[in-house]
Amino acid sequence: MSQVENIEQPARPWWKLPPSSELPPSVNTLLSLAITLALVAVLILAIGANPWEAAKAIIEGSLIEPFFLGQTLMIASILALTGLAAALPFTSRLWNIGGEGQMFAGAIAAVALGIELPSGTPKVLFIAIVIVGSFLGGAIWGLIPGALKAFYGASEIVTTLMLSFVAVFIANYIISEVWPDPFSQKTVSIAENAKFPTIWDDGTVDISVIIALAAAALAWLLMAKTSLGFSIRAIGANPNASRLAGVRTRQVTMLTFLVAGGFAGLAGGVAVAGIFDDLDLNFSSNFGFIGIAVALLARLKPPLIIPAAFLFSMLRVGSNSLQASADISPSLGDILVATFVILLMVTGAIRFRYAQNVSD
């Protein structure tokens, strides 16, 4: 009988990061943020600017003044909703890359209802209709790739992404042909009674924040306390075993995309009725795609979506002050976000680790 020899493992090189399992996610996240700041500081020095002034501009431009803090909270609301739109399908091994398109679908529904419904509709009823309508708009747009995946096996990565382009095209047509504003590239404003009421005047924060918090709570209840949530988690843990256990994968796939699309549609409704009061083709600064990073940073857990969205919102909103405060292009904020996401994956703060299939 051969004996297993104890072979001493070589030491890990100093430059190689330890496996993510050796460090808690919070440490990995802080490590990623520290490396990102260091790399961006080197970049800022290379272009002849002051890194400290840039950091100060981002913090002051996102947290210090009430107006800037309010903007951070409002953008975080959108990112939380698009993060939920990515988190639910990802939990079930389904890739929803089309949060951007689903958000546009919700925005189209919101602006259509906000313009076409009688302006004298009671405010509470009007707002409720806009919220439900934007959810349904995104849900229908999400259901299309869900049905194609369930019945035809079509790649949800391709269908969700391509449908995003279709939604943007429809939005462009509506802006230019259906309800055009005569003075700019946007639609006319929605009715006054359709606009979300403000809950913090100094920060111009409206009920969008409450909607995002309620959506995260509902997503948690769905995933933790319902049979649909159990089925979503079961498929993500082991698709083959879940089928043998009787989980109806087609129905779960369609419902998952329907709910996820609804959350993204709500983000579009928030943008129309809560921030811009109209549909502007440039209303989204890739919020649908940033939502993917939000979901991954939150490790697909709805309660963690909120702080993850706030962090990305702070980086995005704060970068808008770079031009005035530090004489740096605001596009540095995009570099900051992209570098942060890449390093989150390198350090293991963002990762997928599914169980092996029965057939593997």
Image (tube, rainbow, N blue to C red):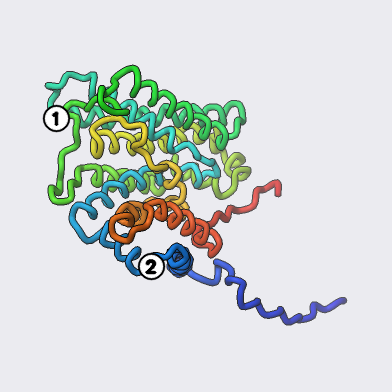
- Determine the image quadrant of residue 188: top left
Q: Residue at x 44, y 43 (%)?
A: 229
Can residue 306 be seen from the camera position used here?
no
- 234 lies left or right of 267: right
Kindly indicate the quadrant of the structure image that contains residue 60: bottom left
Q: Secondary structure at mark 1?
A: helix
Q: Nearer the viewer, residue 256 or 33?
A: 33
Q: Is residue 56 above or below residue 304?
A: below
Q: Which tag, 1 or 2, sits closer to the chain's start?
A: 2
Percent across and percent down for residue 351 are 54, 57
Query: Is disc 2 surrounded by few (<14), some (14 to 19) or many (20+) residues within 10 Å?
Result: some
Provide residue 132's location: percent of width, then percent of height.
29, 30
Q: Residue furthest front?
A: 48
Decide if residue 213 is on the left or right side of residue 140: left
Q: Is residue 296 left or right of residue 353?
A: left
The amino acid type, in three-letter code, at marker 1 is Lys
Pick the quarter of the image with the N terminus.
Answer: bottom right
Q: Tag on residue 51? A: 2
| Residues under numbered marks 1 and 2 in contact, where contact means CB atoms less than 8 Å apart | no
- Looking at the rendered image, the disc whose residue lies closer to the viewer, 1 or 2, is 2
Q: In the rendering, which numbered label is found on residue 123?
A: 1
Q: How many neighbours does mark 1 have within 10 angstroms: few (below 14), some (14-19), or many (20 or more)?
A: some
